[in-house]
Every structure is written in C-alpha cells, then in structure tokens.
Amino acid sequence: MTPRSVPVDEFDLVVFGGTGDLSRRKILPALYKRFCAGQMPGQSRLIGAARSDMGRAAYQAFVREALEEFANVDGSTQLDGFLDRLDYVTLDARGDTGWADLAKKMVPGRVRAFYFSVGPSLFGDLAQGLQKWNLSDDQSRIVVEKPFGHDLETARALNRELACHFDERQIYRIDHYLGKETVQNLMAVRFGNMLFEPLWNSQYIDHIQITVAETVGVGGRGAYYERAGAMRDMMQNHMMQLLCLIAMEPPAKFEPDSVRDEKLKVIRALDPVEPHHIQRGQYTASDGVLSFREDVENARSKTESFIALKCHISNWRWAGTPFYLRTGKRLATRSSEITVVFKDAPHSIFGPEAGRHNNELTIQLQPDEGITLDVTIKEPGPGGMRLIDVPLDMSFAEALGPEADSPDAYERLIIDVIRGNQTLFMRNDEVEAAWAWTDPIIQGWEARGDVPKPYDAFTTGPDGALQMVRRDGRDWRGIRR
C-alpha cells in the first residue's frame, strides 16, 4: 500500500532560525522528504534566515551536513535537486539588516509561509518586520513554535502582538504531537467506526490514561526546563491536546474550526485539580546519570521533571470518569500512549475463579505507532473455563506494509501550512483556555511551598503517583521497570 501525496501549490517557505537545532533536526529533513515525495512543486523554495553570516553555497553545505546526520541521506540522487531549491539571507530580527534582501527573493503570486523557529521573544519583532518590509500579503501564513507563553498573561500578550499584524486564520501554532499518524487515527477510530462511538462515554468507560514517558533527561535544555518544568513544557500543550482529542464531541464536519471548537469545549469543562490529585517528582542521580538538580545547575530547584494528575471533565459524556495524565523524564522506558479502560461486564457468568477481565483500547504514539484492543477469550486447553486477555494488534508497519512509511509529524504539519489547513493547529482561545486551567494548579503548589518528590532515574516515577491511582483501585499502564 503506497501512501498518496496530494499536490500542493508552489510556495516560498522562509525559516527564521534556519541554522538552529530545530531546523537541523526536524524542519530541513521534513522538507527534504516532502521534496522527494513530489510536494515541492515547480520552483518552490526553502529560504533560511538567521544572524549567521553565510552565503547560499555555505548554507547548502550546512543543510547537506544536517540531512546526512538526521535524514539518513547517503548519496541520494535527489539531494542535489533539493539543495538547488535553497537560498539564504543573513537577517537581524530586531534590526534592518537583511530584510530588503529577503524581500527581493520573494516571488509574487506564490504561497508564502514564514516559520518562526526562534524563541518567543522574537515572535513580535518578526511579525512586525514582515509587515514593515511588505513581505506578507493576505494569503501569507506564519508558524510559531512552543512555548507559546509562560502563563495566561504572557500568552494573551503574545496573541495580541501577533494579532496586530496577522489575522487568526494566518497564524499556525504548531504542536508536533498533533501531526503524529496515530493521533489522527484516534479521530478516525472514534468517528469513522460505529463500533466505538456508542461506547465512548462514562457508562462504558471506567477511566482513561495518557502517558508520555521519556528516558532522556533535560540535557542541554537545563536553563529552559528549570523555568518551565514538566507542567508547562508538556502538560499544558502536548498532553492537553491528547486529552482534547480523546474526550471531545464529534465535530459537525472535519474542518479546522469545527474540530477546534470541540477541543475548546473540553478544556473549558475541565474541573480544577485538587492538591491530592497532583504528584510532582524530580529524578535523582543513579545508573551513571546526573540528577535533575545537577542538570539544571540549581541545588535547591523546586521544578518538576515529572508530573501526574487526576482530572475530571464536567459534562454529560464524562461525568464521573477519571482521566489520569502523567509525563516525565528519566523514566524506565520511552513510551507515549493513551489507554481507554472499559468497565467490567455487569455480571460474570463464569464465576469468581475466572478472575476479573475488561477490555482496553491502547493507542501507541511512540516508539512504535499502532492500536491494540484487548479482548477476553477462553484460555486454550482442558480443565474448565479459564479466561485470559489477548490483544487484537494493529501495528501500522505490519498492517499497511513497509511501503506505507508514516511521514514525520513535521512533514505533515508543514504541508498543512502550505495548504492553509489549520485543523491540527491551536487557535488563540484554545491556548488561553489551556493556560487558564494550568495557572491555578501551578500557583497552588507555589503557594503551598510543595517540593517535588525524588525518584530514581529509569524507574516509573515517584511512589506518590502510583499510590494516587491505586487508591482508586486502579493501576498505571505502559511503563514497566
């Protein structure tokens, strides 16, 4: 089964921060793969813009090296063709240097997309520069990366600043989790199959778990992470988006504002989180790795590298159904998954010796994308009715074949920008609603003086997170020691 590439219009994509780490690791490899798939039609171009003083040839060499490292490019016959589509401008976001040169390179009549692969402090300067130098028109788009604000106040200020120069329909707030194949398949499974949607409510679902676990520490992001923590870095955006997709009502149509309207309703229906439903942790030094406090160079750090929450959504569909969310660094495995745990059968005809069994639907986001449904069957062999749970497993690689290689999230999202499709991008009111729910949680533990609990690296996190779920007679899934 060969995936079909839908044609797009010719475009000029300008990447501000074109020599940065995100460009090297994600944006450039994504564009190269889309070029190989035929989605850089005509003379579409990628223009890097940064403060580094280099010419077009030097930038082409820079990109070649990045692709060899991060896109497994080895003597590809298409590499030279892609490099020919590149250009570069030395540009100062807060000054006048380079803007006139960039303006001369833009081709009239093409789709123009401007990727702000820089810190949020430069978003306003870049938006103003694009207007000042007449680089954008009514059909231009800008792409902004997280973190989108540090709290509700700064998010609102940033939204206002961008709105001074661009309409909301032109602003694409990117969250790469929404570009993952399995995340979008979640909507297909829910809304494209009669099997699940009638059961997708508190009458049949016992609880839902969302886990994003990483084995890595904060690495070279210590200064940023000390200021942000797991709540701001992961829970407020990535985890919130997954929660919205799993819990939202069916939209009237699969179109940007219909989908985003339903996601917004979920966020606004979230109850405040009680203090005893919050567990924060910090990894300690073990197995040859530094502690979190050593990584962020603050021996008294109160910032969390792990957080687990128990949440409730106050609406008719989910009344009484708990949602357990957790994310952390230096955990036992790298795993991102959503598990929907259905309730037990109301009456077991097999007696207590058969044990307790329920159905679980697991959506695996990484490392291997796929969907698994656990069903109860009879254990083979004589000796009575013994029940076991077995998975109906749909690994995308196995089910669809090696030709159906899933594109990277950035590949899909960048092409959606070119198409003008905002379905997988956050709207301004959605961002602000997420911060409005997040801020009181953070302010609460700061006011109480709470300190994250230590946990050994490469484990399942602090014991308090395990006990929080076990008090409800449940257990976490997905991370194993």
Image: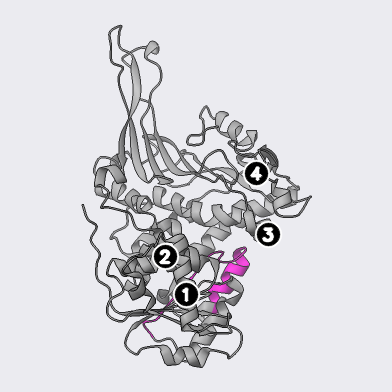
User: Which disc is residue 280 wearing?
Assistant: 4
Residue 454 sits above or below residue 381 on the image: below
Q: Earlier in the sequence, mark 1 or mark 2?
A: 2
Residue 92 sits above or below residue 285 on the image: below
* Gap in angstroms between the C-alphas marked 2 and 3: 30 Å
Number of on-image labels: 4
* Gap in angstroms between the C-alphas marked 3 and 1: 35 Å
The reply to whether discs 4 and 2 touch (Cβ–Cβ < 8 Å) is no
Out of 258 and 365, give the one closest to the viewer: 365
Could you say where residue 358 lies in the image, as x and y percent from the top left? 37, 27
The reply to whether discs 1 and 2 touch (Cβ–Cβ < 8 Å) is no
Q: Which of marks 3 and 4 is in front?
A: 3
* Disc 1 packing (10 Å; few <14; some 14–19; many ≥20): few
Q: Which of marks 1 and 4 is in front?
A: 1
**Residue that badge 3 annotates:** 227
As for residue 143 lying within the magenta part, the answer is: yes
**Residue that badge 2 annotates:** 29
* Gap in angstroms between the C-alphas marked 3 and 4: 15 Å
The reply to whether discs 3 and 1 touch (Cβ–Cβ < 8 Å) is no
As for residue 387 lying within the magenta part, the answer is: no
Secondary structure of the residue carrying numbered label 4: strand
